[in-house]
């Protein structure tokens, strides 16, 4: 369903050098006469030549692993030697190197996939609840690995140099330790945690006995590495997701007979594995049949029905705008109330968490309201899902942006605004974890116990078990990862905290799915939804850049500098004159203009290539259909 499965579990879309080849393969594999055509072609050639072609189809397979007898292997080896002598030494060496690289890539990919955790658990979830639920856990695992990589970068470039420099400095005060530790510090980020490596204020300007080696430069390089890695990963997955969504869009038509008669794996011997495969094929057929039923209903609409439907959609979109405006006003009110904290500890606690509680409540309720509204708009299931996602993404990003703007305005006179900003991102992350625990063990699990304890009650059975809402859960993952990207500069250990949160979240969600949920009644083909998810992360990344390059205060490693990159001036002045001139040109407007012009030329060439490929695909589709008819 979601493209995360294809991006993380299979390599079909990643290994294809061109979308045209992948699409041709998909079309040809689903043509009704493709199998018969292959058999007819196989009967027209000689037996020995057919064997050689069949066993040498995949050049990445070593000769000793081919399922043929020893004499056939010798014949294949002699044929390969003849081909090498006929094409020349250089071309032969290049082909052998390509085979070696291809085999190495396959072995490394297999080894890495074998190290991925929770493989068997995800396979069971896929059979019981479908590919979409499995895709959620695959995406969660991907974010866990990504945050672990962030932790390695931050520990190596930010935390370790600061700890080493503080250990070498005899004037450094000893840490307070846990003598003044309070349990509430975990939830507020105050007390001992405020002066710990978790937040921005802990990292001060210290030198490591070299002009180009000090904590501000290492801090900046570490954060730039995190952001640059995020851009690469997000752009890559967005492009792969867009390619897959385009391939499986309106131009893609599945063949039900192909799935019924050719979808079974006859190598399955375990009854449990057979049941999982059976459920997977059934879910695929349900998706296809629901999409075909909706297309038939759309074709039967009259002009009067269309006019009424358009008018209803306009009213519902106006209602959505009213709900969005009300939620933004509510967030602003919560931020204003936070500044009215008095000496009462209970009241201060509630007011401290009032903005996160407000944002979490709004972000939890309104997406469900948007989902119900989209049902009345009478779109297809996929369009309903994508429309709900667009509205929910706009809600989450806008509420986060409004929250940041009003919070920065409210803390202009604070001694260290960066620490306060990092504490707010920390509280959003912690409260999201608390909300997941509360939803699992105080809402979903008691609901299941109630249904199981009173099986004869019609009211309780009407309540029933909840369905696992894939899109909203994935959207929550994307939202918190956006919070991590926005707050990592002012809370450097936030990726480590998020890693622990994701690890706990996996087992909580697994318990919720297996014990408290039923398989979804409506199946979605949400390949295009992954593009929206990654686009939301890209927007969150741009928000983090805006926050990072804002005006700094008087704390942290960049104390006394108006801009971040001013700390690099001392290092640049120690370099040779030609290097300084090159760096000055690369940071000028002339180089930026040339870079933008080169990007425009490259993008134009890729767009032209894409259009040519689409025309070639349409012609090849017509040719394949003609071959299948004949």
Image: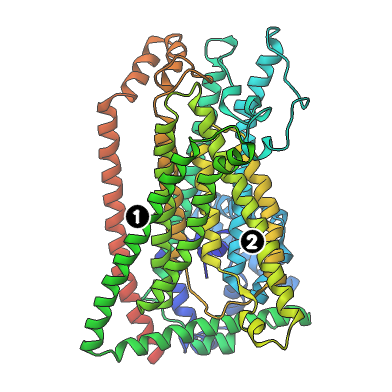
Q: Position of residue 398 (x, y in %)?
A: 39, 49
Seen in the picture, residue 387 relative to 437 is either above or below; the reply is below
Q: What crowding class fits label 2: few (fewer than 14 Cα within 10 Å), some (14-19), or many (20 or more)?
A: some
Viewer-proximal residue among 307 and 77:
307
Q: What crowding class fits label 1: few (fewer than 14 Cα within 10 Å), some (14-19), or many (20 or more)?
A: few
Residue, disc 2: 439
Q: Give the image quarter of residue 138.
A: bottom right
Q: What residue is shown at x 47% (from left), y 89% (from top)?
A: 33
Q: What residue is shown at x 45% (from left), y 17% (from top)?
A: 568
Seen in the picture, residue 564 relative to 529 is either above or below; the reply is above
Q: Secondary structure at mark 1?
A: helix
Q: CA distance from mark 2 to mark 1?
A: 27 Å
Q: What residue is shown at x 28% (from left), y 69% (from top)?
A: 615
Seen in the picture, residue 450 relative to 570 is either above or below; the reply is below
Residue, disc 1: 325
Q: Secondary structure at mark 2?
A: helix
Q: Is residue 37 visible?
A: yes
Q: Position of residue 240 (x, y in %)?
A: 46, 58
Viewer-proximal residue among 381 and 414:
414
Tell me the number on the disc at residue 178: none
Q: Position of residue 41 (x, y in %)?
A: 50, 85
Q: Position of residue 186 (x, y in %)?
A: 68, 38
Q: In the image, 500: left or right of 588?
A: right
Q: Quadrant of the C terminus?
A: bottom left
Viewer-proximal residue among 349 and 482:
349
Total numbered labels placed on residues in the image: 2
Viewer-proximal residue among 293 and 52:
293
Q: Give the image quarter of residue 614.
A: bottom left
- Which is more N-terminal, label 1 or label 2? 1
């Amino acid at each position: 369903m979601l493209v995360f499965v294809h991006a993380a579990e299979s390599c079909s879309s990643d290994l294809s050098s061109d979308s045209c080849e992948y699409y041709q393969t998909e079309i040809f594999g689903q043509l009704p006469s493709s199998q018969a055509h292959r058999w007819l072609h196989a009967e027209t050639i000689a037996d020995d030549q057919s064997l050689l072609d069949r066993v040498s189809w995949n050049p990445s397979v070593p000769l000793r692993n081919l399922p043929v007898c020893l004499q056939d292997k010798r014949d294949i080896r002699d044929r390969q030697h003849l081909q090498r002598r006929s094409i020349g030494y250089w071309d032969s060496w290049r082909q052998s190197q390509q085979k070696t690289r291809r085999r190495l890539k396959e072995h490394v990919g297999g080894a890495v996939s074998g190290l991925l955790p929770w493989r068997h658990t995800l396979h069971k979830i896929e059979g019981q609840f479908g590919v979409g639920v499995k895709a959620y856990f695959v995406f969660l695992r991907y974010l866990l690995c990504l945050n672990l990589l962030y932790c390695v970068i931050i520990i190596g470039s930010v935390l370790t140099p600061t700890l080493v420099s503080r250990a070498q400095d005899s004037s450094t005060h000893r840490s307070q330790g846990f003598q003044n530790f309070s349990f509430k510090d975990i939830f507020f980020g105050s007390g001992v945690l405020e002066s710990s490596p978790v937040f921005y204020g802990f990292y001060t300007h210290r030198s490591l006995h070299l002009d180009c080696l000090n904590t501000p430069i290492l801090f900046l390089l570490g954060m730039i590495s995190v952001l640059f890695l995020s851009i690469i990963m997000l752009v890559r997955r967005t492009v792969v997701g867009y390619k897959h969504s385009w391939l499986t869009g309106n131009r893609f038509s599945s063949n039900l007979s192909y799935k019924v008669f050719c979808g079974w794996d006859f190598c399955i011997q375990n009854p449990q594995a057979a049941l999982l495969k059976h459920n997977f094929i059934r879910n695929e057929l349900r998706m296809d049949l629901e999409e075909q039923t909706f297309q038939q209903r759309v074709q039967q609409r009259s002009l009067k029905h269309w006019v009424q439907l358009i008018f209803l959609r306009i009213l519902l979109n106006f209602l959505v705008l009213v709900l969005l405006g009300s939620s933004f006003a509510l967030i602003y009110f919560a931020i204003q109330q936070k500044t009215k904290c008095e000496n009462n500890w209970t009241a201060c606690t509630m007011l401290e968490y009032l903005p996160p509680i407000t944002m979490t409540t709004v972000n939890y309720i309104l997406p469900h309201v948007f989902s119900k509204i989209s049902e009345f708009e009478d779109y297809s299931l996929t369009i309903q899902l994508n429309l709900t996602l667009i509205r929910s993404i706009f809600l989450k990003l806008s509420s986060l942006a409004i929250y940041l703007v009003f919070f920065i305005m409210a803390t202009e006179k604070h001694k260290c605004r960066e620490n306060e900003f990092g504490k707010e991102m920390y509280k959003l992350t912690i409260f999201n974890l608390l909300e997941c625990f509360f939803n699992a063990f105080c809402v979903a699990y008691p609901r299941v116990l109630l249904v199981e304890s009173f099986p004869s009650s019609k009211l309780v059975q009407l309540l029933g078990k909840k369905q696992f809402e894939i899109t909203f859960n994935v959207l929550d993952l994307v939202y918190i990862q956006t919070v991590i990207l926005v707050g990592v500069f002012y809370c450097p250990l936030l990726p480590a905290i998020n890693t622990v949160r994701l690890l706990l979240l996996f087992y909580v969600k697994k318990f919720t799915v297996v014990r408290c949920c039923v398989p979804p009644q409506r199946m979605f083909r949400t390949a295009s939804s992954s593009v929206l998810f990654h686009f939301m992360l890209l927007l969150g990344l741009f928000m983090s850049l805006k926050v990072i390059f804002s005006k700094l205060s008087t704390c942290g490693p960049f104390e006394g500098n108006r801009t971040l990159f001013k700390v690099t001036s001392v290092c640049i002045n120690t370099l040779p004159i030609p290097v300084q001139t090159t760096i000055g040109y690369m940071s000028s407007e002339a180089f930026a203009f040339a870079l933008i012009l080169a990007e425009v030329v490259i993008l134009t060439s890729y767009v032209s290539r894409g259009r040519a490929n689409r025309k070639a695909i349409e012609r090849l589709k017509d040719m394949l259909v003609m071959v299948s008819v004949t």
